[in-house]
Image (cartoon, helix red, strand yellow):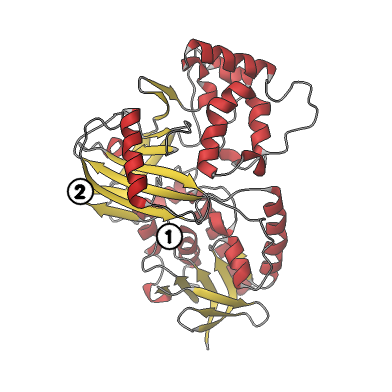
């Protein structure tokens, strides 16, 4: 039987960051079910267009991490972009993001209603003493009915493909653009739309370049592609793979979706505790430019199929419009690719993004899971089961392993910290 100190599940950013951080402590095996590394952070080069599986733009808080990865890209040009994001209101009106800080850009009647509801907290009630108990309640409590129902509720329902009262009040953590009344009013005359991703970086070769940078520190002979984990015996500390290989381990480091890991380890998965959405991503290349100066845009309208559109051509400065289009749906929902593409193209025409353009290339992918639903029930069960797994040498990392909302950089930081901690334990 093969024996390893570290059995790493998944050759995406989290798994590769962990293996890379081990350095000379290279007694590991990385299992990857796909035929390629990268997980959801893959890039497609097709017909002169460069697309990712979805919009993966990097917002580094740790300059040392960014410097290290770029240094390992072999001269790859990395673009630094000042973000321009918009919200579609109508063909002749776009609102700056975030919506709640830019209600003064709305038509006058909508603006006044939003402002009044913001002050009186209409839709929640000023006399309520109990704090909001869900993400949906929080939106009404903080911003009132006007702002909530014009953007925050419909957009996030399209994104998460669920009712927002099912989500925890802090479901998006630091990524939700909070603003108080003073911030909103001050923005009427002094625009300040700064956010965690006000600037971002993007390699000319796509997001996969960051994956390759991490992989450069991982032994290729210790990455098993096309091999899936099928079982973990927590008692004997032996894992079984789809190739009928048995591997004895000291530690498992998994970026697999947490409920799937529980099932593989023979632990109970409480019904309805873990939920998520799936996202159908349609990458589209056209024969000429479209709107300029927008990097991505949000669409809260329920009669428009997609919730977000990103413009690669406005990042690269290229002369042909290159889009990613995202549509949210419940997990496992059947996607009729051709029908969805036809609807998306019609909606792009309706919004004025496409005006007589000719589609010259396309690609699609279904991400399932895409965004996990952060709920109180999931958080409670996760904490209990994570501790139990850790006591058996099984550790979880990443967005799906940690069942949370986080950035790609967060995954790298977490994986490196875990590698440092486990290596210290091994060395004594």
- Mark 1 or mark 2: whose residue is earlier in sequence: 1
Q: In the image, is 116 to the left or to the right of 364?
A: right
Whether residue 202 is visible, yes or no, is yes
Mark 1 near mark 2, Cβ–Cβ under 8 Å? no
Instruction: Identify which residue, 62 or 263, lies in the foreground.
Output: 263
Q: Quadrant of residue 267?
A: bottom right
Residue 44 percent coordinates (x, y): 30, 54
Q: Residue at x 20, y 50 (%)?
A: 47
Please name the residue that numbered disc 2 is placed on.
48
Q: Quadrant of residue 94?
A: top left
Above or below for 6 versus 337 = below
Please name the residue that numbered disc 1 is placed on.
39
Name the outermost residue toward the bottom: 1
Whether residue 206 is visible, yes or no, is no
Q: Quadrant of the C terminus?
A: bottom right
Above or below for 413 versus 249 = above
Q: Tag 1: Cα neighbours inside 10 Å, few (<14), some, or many (≥20)? A: some
Above or below for 321 versus 87 = below
Q: Mark 1 to mark 2: distance in Å?
A: 23 Å
Q: In the image, is 392 to the left or to the right of 239?
A: right
Residue 302 percent coordinates (x, y): 48, 33
Q: Residue at x 62, y 23 (%)?
A: 145
Residue 66 percent coordinates (x, y): 42, 48
Q: Residue at x 47, y 68 (%)?
A: 23
Residue 77 percent coordinates (x, y): 28, 47
Q: Secondary structure at mark 2?
A: loop
Q: Secondary structure at mark 1?
A: loop
Q: In the image, is 190 to the left or to the right of 402?
A: left
């Amino acid at each position: 039987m093969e024996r390893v100190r570290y059995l790493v599940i998944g050759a995406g950013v989290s798994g590769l960051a962990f293996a890379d951080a081990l350095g000379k402590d290279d007694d590991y095996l990385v299992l990857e079910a796909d035929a390629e590394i990268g997980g959801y952070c893959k890039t497609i080069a097709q017909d002169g267009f460069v697309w990712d599986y979805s919009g993966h733009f990097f917002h580094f808080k740790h300059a040392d991490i960014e410097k290290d990865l770029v240094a390992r890209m072999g001269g790859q040009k990395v673009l630094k972009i000042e973000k321009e994001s918009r919200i579609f209101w109508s063909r002749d009106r776009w609102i700056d993001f975030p919506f709640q800080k830019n209600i003064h850009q709305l038509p006058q009647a909508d603006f006044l209603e939003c402002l009044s509801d913001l002050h009186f907290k209409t839709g929640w009630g000023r006399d309520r003493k109990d704090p909001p108990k869900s993400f949906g309640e929080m939106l009404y409590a903080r911003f009132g009915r006007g702002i909530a129902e014009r953007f925050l509720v419909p957009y996030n329902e399209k994104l998460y493909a669920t009712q927002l009262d099912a989500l925890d009040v802090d479901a998006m953590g630091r990524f939700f653009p909070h603003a108080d009344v003073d911030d909103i009013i001050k923005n009427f005359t002094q625009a300040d739309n700064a956010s965690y991703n006000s600037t971002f970086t993007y390699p000319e070769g796509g997001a996969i370049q960051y994956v390759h940078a991490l992989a450069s520190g991982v032994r290729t002979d210790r990455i098993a592609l096309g091999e899936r984990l099928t079982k973990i015996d927590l008692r004997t500390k032996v894992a079984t793979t789809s190739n009928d290989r048995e591997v004895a381990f000291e530690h498992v480091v998994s970026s697999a979706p947490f409920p799937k890991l529980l099932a593989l380890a023979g632990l109970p998965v409480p019904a309805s505790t873990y939920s998520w959405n799936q996202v159908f991503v349609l990458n589209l290349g056209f024969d000429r430019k479209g709107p300029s100066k927008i990097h991505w845009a949000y669409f809260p309208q329920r009669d428009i199929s997609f919730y977000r559109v990103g413009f690669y051509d406005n990042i690269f400065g290229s002369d042909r419009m290159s889009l990613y289009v995202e549509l949210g749906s419940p997990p496992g929902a059947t996607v009729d690719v051709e029908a969805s593409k036809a609807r998306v193209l019609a909606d792009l025409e309706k919004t004025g993004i496409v005006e007589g353009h000719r589609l010259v290339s396309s690609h699609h992918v279904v991400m399932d899971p895409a965004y996990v639903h952060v709920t109180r029930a999931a958080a409670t069960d996760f904490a209990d089961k994570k501790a139990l797994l850790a006591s058996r040498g099984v550790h979880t990392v990443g967005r799906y392993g940690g069942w949370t909302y986080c950035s790609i950089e967060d995954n790298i930081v977490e994986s490196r910290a875990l590698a440092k901690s486990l290596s210290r334990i091994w060395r004594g």
